[in-house]
Image (cartoon, rainbow, N blue to C red):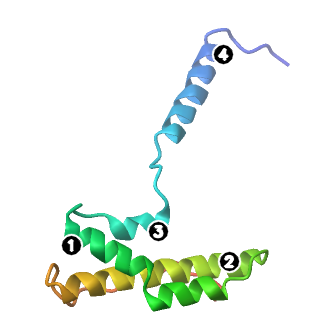
Amino acid sequence: MRPIPLPMVPMRRSLVLAALLLGACTPSYRADEAAFRGPDDPAHRECRAEAENAPAVVDIGRRTLIGNVAQQERMAAERQDAVARAYQDCLRRRGLIRGGGVEPVRRPGMF
C-alpha cells in the first residue's frame, strides 16, 4: 500500500471541514413552523394563536400515543396539516388572503 501524498491530506481535511460548515448552515426552524411564515402584525399573530387552539389540532393532540413512534410521526404530520389549514382558514375569514389555490404536496407515507 502506497502512502498518501502530503498535499492530499490537507485537501481532504478542508473538504470535511466544508461539509461540516454547510451542515451547520441549515435552517433552525421546525417543519411545522413553515405554515406560520408571514407578516408579524396583530391579525397574523391572532390567526397563529387561533390555529394552535383549533378543535382539530387539539383533538389530534389527544389522540397521540406516546411511545409508538410510527403513530407519533403520523399524528405529527396530521397536526402540521391541521394547523396550516386552520391558519389559512383564519386568514381567509379576515380577508387577508384570497381563497382557492393549489393544495400543498403531501409527503408519501404508509398511512
* Left or right relative to 35: residue 91: left
Q: Earlier in the sequence, mark 3 or mark 4?
A: 4
Of 29 and 51, the residue lying toward us: 51
Label 3 neighbour load within 10 Å: few <14, some 14-19, many 20+: some
Which three-letter amino acid code belongs to the residue tagged 1? Ala
Residue 82: x percent and y percent? Answer: 45, 85
How much space separates mark 2 and mark 3, taking CA atoms?
A: 14 Å
Which three-letter amino acid code belongs to the residue tagged 4? Val
Q: Is residue 104 visible?
A: no
**Residue that carries the numbered disc 2 in the rendered image:** 72
State the residue at coordinates (43%, 77%): 52
Mark 2 or mark 1, which is nearer to you?
Answer: 1
**Residue that carries the numbered disc 4 in the rendered image:** 9
Label 2 neighbour load within 10 Å: few <14, some 14-19, many 20+: some
Which three-letter amino acid code belongs to the residue tagged 2? Gln
Q: Is residue 34 above or below residue 85?
A: above
Q: Earlier in the sequence, mark 2 or mark 1?
A: 1
SS type, badge 1: helix
Task: Please state, as top left, top right, bottom left or bottom right, where the N terminus lies in the image.
Answer: top right
How much space separates mark 3 and mark 4, taking CA atoms?
A: 42 Å
**Residue that carries the numbered disc 1 in the rendered image:** 43
SS type, badge 4: helix
Q: Earlier in the sequence, mark 4 or mark 2?
A: 4
Residue 111: x percent and y percent? Answer: 63, 89
**Residue that carries the numbered disc 3 in the rendered image:** 32
Q: Is residue 35 visible?
A: yes
Q: Earlier in the sequence, mark 1 or mark 3?
A: 3
